[in-house]
Amino acid sequence: SGLEVDVLGGRPGVWSSSFGGEEGNHARNNLRMMEELRRAGVKPGDKPSARFRCVMVLARNGSVLAEFSGSVEGHMLTAPAGEGGFGYDPLFVPEGHELSFAQLPMAVKNSMSHRARALAQVVEWMKECRD
């Protein structure tokens, strides 16, 4: 899972958790993100496209059985908004919303989770295999 920001060439991607230099340090990751957006020429009010993406792979005995991907499209902010959530939530606004993930109620955020979307595909695939 990770955050893909188009203006940054898809970074940080799978390195999202350590983008700021220290694994799991959300504050440092967000500071680095804001710095990188500025370096890329993003100005306040711009809405650079981004997405949270999760890829799940089912494998058995070293063979890939199936691959699944879930994503949430949106855009980045140049300054944090909101206190809720974790990670990049204060900097990410999902498509169709005006508030960041950190400002949205947890139930709304969870209803569009990139991980939940990928897992739903896994569950559907497993049901089809069982039939």
Image (cartoon, grey):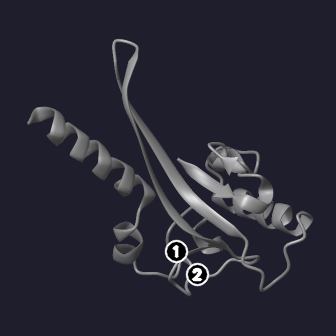
Q: Are marks 1 and 2 in contact (CB under 8 Å)?
A: yes
Within-10-Å neighbours for mark 2: few <14, some 14–19, many 20+ = some
Q: Residue furthest left?
A: 131
Would residue 5 be found to the left or right of residue 65 on screen?
Answer: right
Q: Residue at x 48, y 48 (%)?
A: 54
Element type where label 1 sits in the image? loop
Q: Residue at x 38, y 77 (%)?
A: 108
Would residue 59 be found to the left or right of residue 42 on screen?
Answer: left
Looking at the rendered structure, the kind of residue marked 2 is: Gly
Instruction: Calculate the distance from the C-alpha at mark 1 to the C-alpha at mark 2.
Output: 8 Å
Using the image, determine if residue 103 lies above or below residue 117. below
Q: Nearer the viewer, residue 59 or 88?
A: 59
Residue 72, position as x, y percentages in the image: 50, 64
Would residue 18 be found to the left or right of residue 84 on screen?
Answer: right
Q: Nearer the viewer, mark 1 or mark 2?
A: 1
Q: Nearer the viewer, residue 27 or 6?
A: 6
The residue at which mark 2 appears reads as 82
Using the image, determine if residue 98 lies above or below residue 65. below
Element type where label 2 sits in the image? loop
Query: Label for residue 101?
Result: 1
Mark 1 vs 2, N-terminal side: 2
- Quarter of the view holding residue 105: bottom left
Within-10-Å neighbours for mark 1: few <14, some 14–19, many 20+ = many
Query: Label for residue 80?
Result: none
Looking at the rendered structure, the kind of residue marked 1 is: Phe
Residue 107, position as x, y percentages in the image: 34, 75
**Which quadrant, please, contains the C terminus?**
top left
Residue 45, position as x, y percentages in the image: 77, 86
